[in-house]
Amino acid sequence: MKRKTKRLLLNWRVLLLILFLTGSIATLALKPLTFGIDIAGGVALVAQTEHPVDSNTMQIVVTSLQKRLNTLGLRDITVEAQGDQIVLVKVANVSTEEQANQIKAVIENQGVFYMEFNGVVFGTGKDVEYVGIYQIKPDNSWAVPFRISKKAAEKFAELAKGKPGWPVDMFLDPPVNSLLVVSGKIYHLMNSTEFNAEAPQAPTLMERINRALNISAIAYSNQSAEEIAKLAQGKQKVVLIDVPQELQKELEDLNVTVSYIQRGPGESDHQLVVKALGLYGPYAVGEGLTVGKPQQDVQISGKAPNRVVAEQEASTIYTVLKSGSLPVKLNVVGMQFISPRLGEDFKNQALYAGLGALLTVLAIIYFHYRRWKIAIPVASTSLFEVIIILGFAALINWNLDLPSIAGIIAAIGTGVDQQVVITDELLSGDRSTRIARRSSILKRMGRAFFVIFASAATTITAMSFLLVYFVGTLKGFAFTTILGVLIGILITRPAYAEIAKYLLGED
């Protein structure tokens, strides 16, 4: 008996199970499980593209957004395309409005970046070669250092030669090729030297953006929507700034693309213009940059009313510069917070349900075979399978959501069925002679594992289709089901067969 026990413990299939079980327990002890938004709570944002796009463009949008949000240092992010215009973004463990607004800003920034001097664009986002870590100073000013290409640096050096103090403008998502309809005071401001840095003799901001970005402006003086639409012919859109909002609907009724810039609380005219144009700067060119020598290291800087806002602004600029531009602009049309309280309740309920299911399996197997030495190994193997699945999920930082847990349950249910097949084959054998019995065991185990592998192959094939061709929650269900089936046929089922043979005296 001792020799049989020792032989069982040294069996490579049993050793493999022990190894994976020990590794999974150690992993779960060192790395906690991560949960999806439906359990951990978070925020879900619905974004819409400016116009319908094809599947390839939508895939680029999804990939780029995932990269951007990962750059923010967020975890547990899912980005899903739904149709040709809607993108659903879910971020777990987000509970404050400030965090949600930062994510919203990252999504809505298309990330088209321009560097302009004296009405000439000398560089774009494609010229950004490296982005350094942003810095926040005690006075809530911030700076994002980055490096531009040699070609862009040489072009700027040529343009800025002999022009110390002249303004350098940097734009993020400016309204290129558009008509600005602005109030009289905004029009006057943009045509003044307010944005000329230290060079009043330089062209005004209005002149610079007209030449560089094809942005023109008119002062609103009760023109009709028809008159404005006529002036906007050939432009991509009309941008309304500090004018009656009723104009937006009137222009939209004429099939004109319109953007209305809302003035924020306490926002000055200067701040309103900066926001409308996506303007950073203007920065005064230092004398060292006007001698015709290229310099590739530059920075974007700004100042915020408090450190939280400074952190958000700097982080957004850093993220957009580092991840590049989106092929189409997105607008967030819906945002919903999901409380983690429901998820916490569900985790407790899932634990109780899991324990209840194991006890039920134990009872059913016992009443079927009337042998505890069959019922206990079957239930224990199911428990081991769950631990190994969870250990693997923790190891790869897989986010467990409701469908993922459903996949685990489905895999365990399949596993119990397969253990019953193995047990029935072992109990149906011929006990005539030792040699005949050993030969019979091999045949019966061959039949059992043929059924098991055939069932597993069917399940994996079906789930692989969901994993590859579907998006969203079905992926979690498919992944954990496939993982559970693979762990079963490669680790737990072979080990159970050896243990069952030993317990039933078939070894």
Image (tube, rainbow, N blue to C red):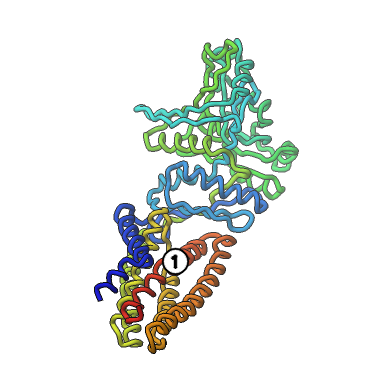
Q: In terms of image quadrants, where is residue 37?
A: bottom left
List x then y, in percent, for residue 47. Answer: 55, 51
Residue at image x 67%, y 40%?
A: 237
Residue at image x 45%, y 42%?
A: 72
Residue at image x 60%, y 35%?
A: 174
List x then y, in percent, for residue 480. Answer: 45, 64
Camera-side residue: 120 or 254?
A: 120
Q: From the viewer's perspective, tell me whether residue 416 is left or right of residue 329.
A: left
Camera-side residue: 224 or 446?
A: 446
Q: In terms of image quadrants, where is residue 162?
A: top right
Q: Residue furthest left?
A: 2
Q: From the viewer's perspective, tell me whether residue 366 is left or right of residue 284.
A: left
Q: In terms of image quadrants, where is residue 11?
A: bottom left
Q: From the viewer's perspective, tell me whether residue 318 is left or right of residue 114.
A: left
Camera-side residue: 360 or 297?
A: 360
- The answer to whether residue 207 is visible is no
> Relative to 138, does residue 361 appear above or below in the rendering?
below
Q: Which residue is mark 1?
A: 490
- Number of on-image labels: 1
- The answer to whether residue 20 is visible is yes
Which quadrant is the N terminus positioned in? bottom left
Q: Residues within 10 Å of mark 1 (few under 14, many from 20)?
A: some
Amino acid carrying mark 1 in the image? Leu
> Relative to 253, does residue 205 appear above or below in the rendering?
above
The local secondary structure at tag 1 comes to helix
Camera-side residue: 431 or 264?
A: 431
List x then y, in percent, for residue 493. Answer: 41, 71
Which quadrant is the C terminus positioned in? bottom left
